[in-house]
Amino acid sequence: MNTSLSTRDILEKLIAFPTLCRTENVELIDWIEAFLRDLGARCLRVAGEHPGRFNLFASIGPETDDGIVLSGHSDVVPVEGQPWTTDPFALTERDGKLYGRGTSDMKGFLACMLVAARHAAQKPDLRAPLHLAFSHDEEIGCVGVHSLLRDLAAQGFKARGCVIGEPTGLHVISGHKGKLAAKITCHGLAAHSANPARGCNAISLAASMVKAIEELQEELKNNGILDDHFEVPYSTMQVGLIRGGVALNIVPDLCDVQFEMRLLPGADPQPWIERLRQEAARLCANTPHARIEIETLNAYPGLDTAEDVSFLRDIMRITGDNRASRIGFGTEGGLFNEYLNMPVVVCGPGSIDRAHKADEFILPEELDACGYFVKQIVDTLL
């Protein structure tokens, strides 16, 4: 393994692995692990719930409890149906930009993590370790990293703090919202549309539940907890998917509604879910043949790192930020904090505005700046 590759060359290798979420990432993990083992890193591979999907954790330096974790996810979102003008899985330079799926979100940071590992391996006098965490299936709700964090927690792993390298333009982020995704399944009774009164319309039940969600959203906006650090300063609820019906001349007996909540850090979604359950019970009590079920599909916590935490202040000194910001999108940061009880900041190269779109790109100077950033983090371990 050639461990002297430039950051751009490493990124080119990583982009070539089409590690779409919900698919295998084993080949990428094999390559990264070989790279790190050649540097002398101690590596732990943790399998996910599905074949061919893995998390990887690596450490360089002494086995002490005051190291720093750099963390990033290996998966990327699909490209199907997007009007790419380059091959999304071949790093392409054009007009001073480096194009490819995952360049900003977030294989650019993964490449810098490996540069940081090489820098650490060249420092025999490290007083504290550098740790690297590579996860899978972050893009579908931060689901893959759980097996790694459970394993580390069971080992009693400790570190001074963690940097999640999501694209923030290398500005330090101290907090983000959490998320809960849920499904409402409405059961009715099928009938011929010539006499709809003989049936129970599941789509009508679903429409009532959608209205209830919209009313709760207004309540969250007008009477809920507020945090002006966020662009949207309140928790939100919104419906994203509705599926129901078989044919226009059949009263539908099944309809499901999927919705999400984006929650301010520390906000409890359960009272709002209970309000929906109460509305479902009221609808079913007044509608023959109606049955409504509500289930949580996925959830992850928000992140709220206090401004006076020394780890946060140290990372801000490296970036030159005068104050930390907050973001609306979620990361694995809240899970690292929840499982391992360590302070977490989010800071990485590129822009979230380029993520999940055709012709995603990162600038060469952004890669260079991040390489310098992670090397400075390593130097704090000396």
Image (cartoon, rainbow, N blue to C red):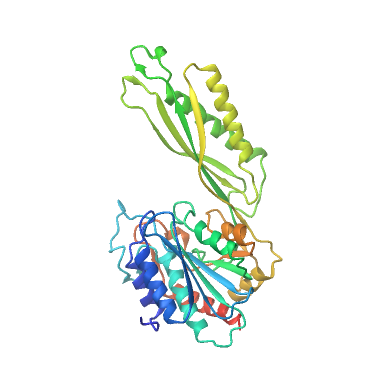
Using the image, determine if residue 240 lies above or below residue 317.
above
- Residue 2: percent from the left, percent from the top? 36, 82
Picture quarter with the C terminus = bottom right
Number of numbered labels in the structure image: 0
Using the image, determine if residue 280 lies above or below residue 200.
below
Residue 164 relative to residue 66: left or right? left
Towards the viewer: 261 or 296: 296
Residue drawn 50% across the image and 31% down it: 293
Residue drawn 57% across the image and 25% down it: 281
Towards the viewer: 18 or 355: 18
For residue 219, which quarter of the picture?
Answer: top right
Residue 113 relative to residue 233: left or right? left
Using the image, determine if residue 12 lies above or below residue 83.
below
- Can residue 97 be seen? no
Using the image, determine if residue 277 lies above or below residue 236.
above
For residue 1, which quarter of the picture?
Answer: bottom left
Towards the viewer: 338 or 211: 338
- Residue 12: percent from the left, percent from the top? 34, 72
Residue drawn 53% across the image and 76% down it: 373
Q: Residue furthest front?
A: 155
Towards the viewer: 21 or 308: 21
- Can residue 372 be seen? yes
- Residue 149: percent from the left, percent from the top? 54, 61
Residue drawn 42% across the image and 59% down it: 355
- Residue 146: percent from the left, percent from the top? 52, 56
Residue 51 relative to residue 180: left or right? left
